[in-house]
Amino acid sequence: MIEYIEFLIWPFLAAVVLVGIHVYFGLHVIKRGIIFVDLSLAQVAALGTTVAFLTGFEPHGDAAYIYSLVFALLGATIFTFTRKVEGKVPQEAIIGIVYAVSSAAAIMAVSRSPEGAEHIRYLLVGSLLTVTPASVLKTAAVYGVVGLFHWLARSRFICLTFGDKEKCSNPGIWEFLFYASFAVVVTSSVKICGVLMVFIFLVVPSVFGALMTDSIGKRLIAGWIFGLVGSALGMVLSFVLDTPTGATIVCTFGLLLLLYGLLRRFKK
C-alpha cells in the first residue's frame, strides 16, 4: 500500500493542479450556460495533437503541444465571434458542432493508422498515472501565469460572466482573452488527462459549488474541496477495484454529485 501511495503522489499532485484552475473556469462556464465549451475546446486541442502525431511528431513532445495550442486558439476565436449570434442561434449549438466536427476529423485522420485506436483512447482518458514531475511542474507554472492574469483582470471577467455585459468596457477583447487563456489551460490539461477528465474537472466540482452557495468565493472553495476529495477517492478505488484510474475518477465524480443531489432532495 505504501508503494502504491508513493506511485500516486505525482498523479495526485497533477489532479490538484488540474482541479485548481478548472474549478475557476467552471464557475464562468456554468454561469454562462456554455457547459460543453470545455469538452469542445479539449477535442479541438486533441485534433491538433492528432495532426502532429500523423505528421510524425511524438504526442508528448513540444511540437505536438504547439499544434494542439494553435488548434485550441482557433477554437477560442470561433467561440468569441459566435457569442454575437446568440440571439438567433444558441452558442451551445455552435459548440456542439465544433465538438462533433473535431471528433469526426480526428477519427478520419487516424483511420488508416495502425495505432489509431490506441491514440483515440489516449486522447479520451489520457495517461494520468504516467505523468512526470517535470510535466506537473511545467503545467503548474502555466496555470499559475493564467491564474495570475485572471486575478489581476478579475473585475473584467466577473463583469462579463456575472454582471451586465453591455456595461463592460471592451467586451469583445476581454471575451477573446477569456477563451484564449481557457484554450491554453485546456491544451495542457488534455496532454495529461484526456478529454473526458478535462470535462469532468471543469463541470462537476463547479456544479457542486453552485448547488452549495451563491457566493462566488465560496463556490470556488467548495469546488476545490469536492475536486480534491473526488480525485483522491477515485485513485483509491482504482487501486481497490483494479480499474483504469482516469475512468474511475470520472465515475467517482459523477457518483459523489449524485449522492449529494439525493441528500439535498431527502433533506427537502
Image (cartoon, grey):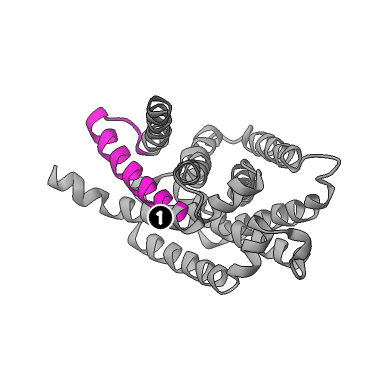
Position in image of residue 95 (x %, y %): 71, 42
Dot 1, how many residues are within 10 Å of its Cα: few (below 14), some (14-19), or many (20+)?
Answer: some
Res 194 visible: yes
Q: Is residue 14 magenta?
A: no
Query: Is residue 7 found left or right of 168 in the rendered image?
Result: left
Residue at position x 41%, y 44% in the image? 127
Query: Is residue 255 found left or right of 241 in the rendered image?
Result: right
Position in image of residue 113 (x %, y %): 59, 36
Residue at position x 35%, y 50% in the image? 225
Look at the magenta stretch and give its main secondary structure: helix
User: Which residue is labeled 1 in the image?
Assistant: 221
Position in image of residue 169 (x %, y %): 76, 70
Image: magenta residue range: 219-245
Image quarter where the C terminus lies is top left
Residue 244, placed above or below residue 3: above
Query: Is residue 97 found left or right of 230 in the rendered image?
Result: right
Query: Is residue 255 found left or right of 203 in the rendered image?
Result: left
**Residue type marked 1:** Ile
Q: Return the residue nearer the eye: 198 or 55.
A: 198
Res 18 visible: no
Q: Quadrant of residue 218?
A: bottom left
Position in image of residue 199 (x %, y %): 53, 42
Residue at position x 51%, y 53% in the image? 58
Q: Return the residue nearer the eye: 71 or 31.
A: 31
Q: Quadrant of residue 105?
A: top right
Residue at position x 86%, y 41% in the image? 88
